[in-house]
């Protein structure tokens, strides 16, 4: 399930997860699947950005502010991360109104 190339689809954390910042990045607890997912600092940063639903475009802009990375590499890395996180059921596509509500 590739993220939209236009960058307008919104992505959000799956609602049933709990996460915590740890020394190595972020630890996600998925009680429904009885598993833990450990994210490194970069992946943990992307995860923290999804505290509210965000578009691919917004994720790329925020990541480029935090990391010294060119736009194309950043887009490819975030698309791959989103693909992986969606395959695991940790990130979902959010309805457009979720983004509007998070900015209200």
Image (cartoon, rainbow, N blue to C red):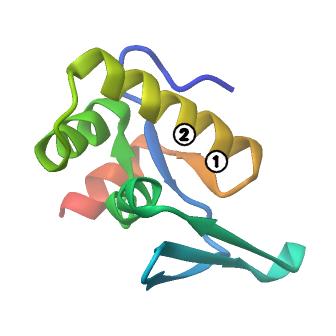
Residue 67 percent coordinates (x, y): 20, 44
Q: Residue at position x 54%, y 40% from top? A: 81
How many neighbours does mark 1 have within 10 angstroms: few (below 14), some (14-19), or many (20 or more)? some
Single out the residue that lies furthest toward the left. Answer: 65
Q: Residue at position x 32%, y 28% from top? A: 74
17 left or right, relative to 56: right
36 left or right, relative to 98: right
In-front residue for pair 88/70: 70
Q: Quadrant of residue 75?
A: top left
Q: Which mark is residue 103?
A: none
Residue behind mark 1 = 85
How many neighbours does mark 2 have within 10 angstroms: few (below 14), some (14-19), or many (20 or more)? some
The CA distance from mark 2 to mark 1 is: 6 Å
Residue 58 percent coordinates (x, y): 25, 39
Quarter that holds the C terminus: bottom left
Quarter that holds the N terminus: top right
Q: Residue at position x 36%, y 33% from top? A: 56
Against 84, residue 45 (above or below) is: below
In-front residue for pair 62/54: 62
Residue behind mark 2 = 81
Counting every numbered tag in the picture gives: 2
Tell me whether circle 2 and circle 1 mark residues in contact (CB < 8 Å): yes
Residue 3 percent coordinates (x, y): 53, 26
**Secondary structure of the residue carrying numbered label 2:** helix
In-front residue for pair 22/32: 22
Q: Quadrant of residue 103?
A: bottom left
């Amino acid at each position: 399930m590739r993220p939209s190339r236009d960058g307008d689809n919104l992505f959000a954390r799956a609602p049933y997860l709990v996460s915590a910042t740890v020394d190595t990045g972020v630890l996600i607890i998925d009680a429904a699947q009885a598993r833990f997912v450990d994210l490194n600092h970069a992946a943990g940063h992307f995860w923290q950005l999804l505290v509210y639903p965000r578009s691919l475009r917004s994720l790329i802009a925020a990541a480029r502010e935090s990391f010294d990375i060119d736009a194309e590499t950043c887009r490819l890395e975030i698309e791959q991360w989103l693909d992986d996180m969606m395959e695991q059921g940790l990130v979902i596509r959010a309805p457009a109104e979720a983004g509007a509500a998070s900015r209200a």
